[in-house]
Image: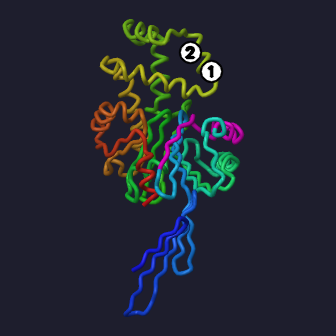
Amino acid sequence: MLFIWHPLFVFYMNQNMEENSTLIIILIKLKTSIYCIHNCCIKEYFMKLIADSGSTSTHWMLIYPNDEQKEIFTKGINPFLQTDIEIYDLIKTEFNHSINDKIQIFFYGAGCANIEKNSIVERALLKYFPNAKVLVDSDMMGACRALLKDSKGIVSILGTGSNSCFYNGSMIEKNVSPLGYILGDEGSGAYLGRKLLSDILKNQLSREIQTLFFNKYNTTQAEIQENVYKKPFPNRYMAGFTRFLSENITYTEIENIVKSGFAEFIKRNILQYEDSHNYPLSFVGSVAYIFENQLKEVAENLGYTIGKIVQNPMDDLVDYHLK
């Protein structure tokens, strides 16, 4: 066995005297790629970029060929709410890393529900990363790969929006459409925030809670309605009030808002999956993570067990794509 080191490449030779054969592997390490020449078969190992994007924020992980990793955060990307030009402008402004070398991109995003919407994100990515190989898939698929790997089960997202599916170990077999923050998204941050705002403005909560709310946010009904009905991304705005719910979760009336939202999510989504009670429910997202105790209580009352709950799936996605 012989190693010959060089600043740009490594020779590795292993002679098997019995078979009178020689195995030669040459590793050529450049700035962003590693080339492996194995008995004249050439394979190139690219940089990888994994993105987990919700409507509020996008978590990027840049992985170099030597497995060094770099985290980057930008605002959320959703092709139902943004054009390819708007997404490109967002990446150009906030990503702050120019990469002209070959790179593999795995983008998992909210709103990436069909070919038409996925192509919007793909065009924006290819414009910013001209030498990229791009795969765009739903945030739901990202959650499945992160939590279940190759196992089957029920996975849900509870973040700014909500979603769920039955995953058969390789693909999403059934998905109850979340319908977005106006028609659906039960249990999500936008859903819970909307319920809180409605109950505050319609005097459905105690005077103590209303006082706490207006002292914290120093806002008015007119300003709230302006943000909800006229300004961009009302879902993000409403989801922002989950912080108030979390800070005041010890009040029964606040906890009831959260619990009722989770109960609606399970009844209107999870119950539609055949034999759903036979599988533990696994969750990704800040809302599931922050209100884990309330989620477990509601699920158990409805006959379910909870599997894994993670706030952020990135570490598990990195493991999946590096395996």
Are the two marked residues, 2 and 1, in contact with CB atoms closer than 8 angstroms?
A: no
Disc 2 designates what residue? 224
Give the x, y percent position of residue 149.
40, 56
Q: Between 317 and 251, which is closer to the camera in this rendering? A: 317
The quadrant holding residue 294 is: top left
Q: Which mark is residue 229?
A: 1
Image position, residue 158 (x, y; %): 44, 37
Please state the horizontal and vertical placement of residue 60, each as a whole percent of the image: 52, 44
Q: Which quarter shows the N terminus?
A: bottom left
Number of labels in the image equals 2
Q: Nearer the viewer, residue 225 or 98?
A: 98
Magenta stretch?
A: 69-90
Find the distance from the CA under tag 2 to the CA under tag 1.
Answer: 9 Å
**Residue type at the position of mark 1:** Tyr
Of the numbered discs 2 and 1, the one sitting upstream in the chain is 2
* Residue appearing at x 52%, y 81% in the figure: 39
* Label 2 packing within 10 angstroms: few (<14), some (14-19), many (20+): some
Compared across the picture, whether 293 is left or right of 8 comes to left
Determine crowd level at label 1: few under 14, some 14-19, many 20+ residues with C-alpha closer than 10 A: few
Q: Give the residue at x 61% y 50%.
A: 114
Residue drawn 60% across the image and 56% down it: 103
**Residue type at mark 2?**
Ile
Picture quarter with the C terminus: bottom left
